[in-house]
Image (cartoon, rainbow, N blue to C red):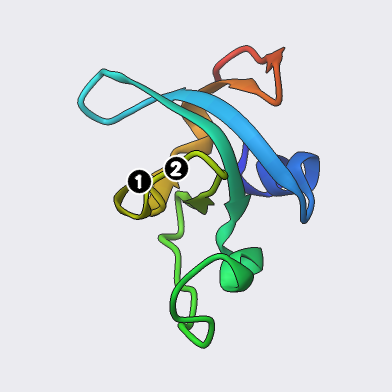
Amino acid sequence: MTKQDFKTIVGNGFFSCAWIKNDGQVGIVKRAILGEHAHRHTNNPTLPVREHQDYVLGFRVGNGLTPEHKRWVSINPLTVFKLNGVRYARQ
């Protein structure tokens, strides 16, 4: 899936996903929000959000997460195989 496809599916709400990282491991995010919508969840709401041209920037959130686990994550949309509980074929 392309970066724009990913953002269209997710919209401005919360999402979960699983993807293959560059090192071959599986990355899993149980609850996150797109970086451009994460200003309410970060400690610095005026932080400008800049993402890599090939990756989607998300911010991990959740009531049960400790502060050290609330952090940014870069997701490669080309290797996403599960998004919001729906399996997708990798390209």
Say left or right for 13 vs 44. right
Which residue: 44% across, 75% down?
43
Which residue: 27% across, 18% down?
25
**Does 65 sit above or below residue 58?**
above
Give the residue type at disc 2. Answer: Leu
Which residue: 49% across, 74% down?
49
Q: What residue would you read off at disc 2?
A: 65
Q: What element carries label 2?
A: loop
Say left or right for 51 vs 4. left
Q: Quadrant of residue 65?
A: top left
Q: What residue would you read off at disc 1?
A: 69
Q: Quadrant of residue 50?
A: bottom left
Q: In terms of depth relative to the viewer, which is nearer, 2 or 8?
A: 8
Q: x, y (%) of residue 83?
A: 65, 25
**Does 1 sit above or below residue 36?**
above
Which residue: 46% across, 83% down?
47
| Label 1–label 2 contact, CB within 8 A | yes
Q: In which quarter of the image is the N terminus?
A: top right
Say left or right for 18 vs 70. right
Residue closest to the far left: 23
Give the residue type at disc 1. Answer: His
Spatial separation of the CA atoms under disc 1 and disc 2:
6 Å
Crowding at dot 2, Cα within 10 Å, few <14 / some 14-19 / many 20+, comes out as few
Q: Does residue 33 appear anywhere in the picture?
A: yes
Q: x, y (%) of residue 38?
A: 59, 65
